[in-house]
Image (cartoon, rainbow, N blue to C red):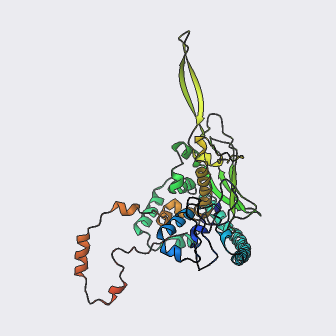
Amino acid sequence: MDSSSANVDIKKKQQQEAPTPQNTPIFSAPINSVRPAVDEDMETIQTPGTSLLANNPQLMSMLQGRLGNLVGAPSGYVQTLPADVRRRVKGLKSIQKKHAVLEAEFQNEILALEKKYLALYTPLYEKRAEVISGKTEPTDAEVAEGVSEDEDEEDQEGDEDEEDKDAEKVEGIPEFWLTALKTHPQFAEIITEKDEEALKHLVDIRMAYFEKPGFRLDFEFSPNDFFTNTILTKTYFYQDEPGYGGDFVYDHAEGSKIEWKEGKDLSITVETKKQRHKGTNKTRVVKKTVPAETFFSFFTPPVAPEDDDDELDEEEEDLDERLEADYGLGEEIKDSIIPRAVDWFTGKALQYQDHGDQYDDDFEYDDEDDEEDDDDEDDDEDDDDNVPAKDEKAPECKQQ
């Protein structure tokens, strides 16, 4: 289940029928009985056909502007059509409903396929966890298969020399998951320095599907000074009814309650303030706990209000964005970090991230140099037609 295919419906609003006026020509074909709807302050037009509209661009523009402002709202356009045309539209709706049934079956088959392959991936994930924790060592064949063709030979030789020099052997791969998470741009923004001490004890991240649409993320920790939980979970639930197009509609998420040890709660900060008594002029120190930014807020997801109140407080205005961002983080862990953990640990996964146009801003191109290079090329070369134009972008290598 890809994050781009997931239909996130934050406020659980009912799906509306796709509006047609803004995407439909005012008259796709000459219909003599069609009469444009106008306000009372507009002149009533009863000329049959569309010749008047064609000869009156101001009226055409006015009608198009009014229809364009009706996005997502009933326009009454279909009701103005002749009875036989409305009957055909109803027939198309029947076809659309049958298509929606097939789309829902398609999504269910994709989910079944994901479950099937998760079962095949699981032994690999278990072996990976054993290597990371130091319970087992990779075989020589696995090490040989893991060496990429473009790997630097000097790095390999350095690794061998360092093995001989190390007097103290290190178990497994320390801070593997912390490093993988910090390499990911979205998680790097929410992991604080204090979080790192706790995340050093993160030994594995796993996932599981349910029979119903939804998934659970399990974060396993070794004994640490921060909390007593050995596993922290985050569960994402979907609505029972599929959304438009058969996609699963995100409903809400639930996280584990973290059993913090005394004085180790990373989710709060203790602020101290001095207060002066007006009568005695004596001062006292008052301590107040306030929420702190931390990665572990991930296990306390935002909750949508039960009542849809149009007058939201300022703090709730960005609730939709926070809910969607929380869901996106879960999808990233499920679809990217867990399957390609070693690539995030080494940083290779960053090569496949979409960085937008930031690279274009980092370099300046000299058009004169480009022209000189073009002049030096051999005009008789047969492959000139296969060379991309200067303004064309080279194909981008992306990993989904």
User: Is residue 218 toward the left or the right of residue 176 in the image?
Assistant: right
Q: Position of residue 378 (x, y in %)?
A: 25, 86
Vertical comparison of 214 with 145: above or below = above
Tell me where residue 290 sits by quadrant.
top right
x, y percent for residue 124: 64, 67
Left or right: residue 308 versus residue 60 is right
* Outermost residue toward the top in this view: 280
Q: Quadrant of the C terminus?
A: bottom right
**Residue 260 position in % (x across, y down):** 66, 39
Residue found at x 54% / y 66%: 63
Q: Quadrant of the N terminus?
A: bottom right
Query: Can residue 67 be spotted in the picture?
Result: yes
Nearer to us in this view, 313 or 291: 313
Left or right: residue 206 versus residue 371 is right
Number of numbered discs: 0
| Image coordinates for residue 159, horizontal then vertical, percent | 46, 62
- Residue 168 shows up from this direction: no
The answer to which of 102 and 134 lies nearer the viewer is 102
Residue drawn 68% across the image and 62% down it: 16
Q: Quadrant of residue 395?
A: bottom left
Q: Nearer the viewer, residue 387 or 149?
A: 387
Query: In the picture shown, does residue 392 fall above or below 14?
Result: below
Q: Is residue 223 above or below residue 60?
A: above
Towards the viewer: 383 or 99: 99
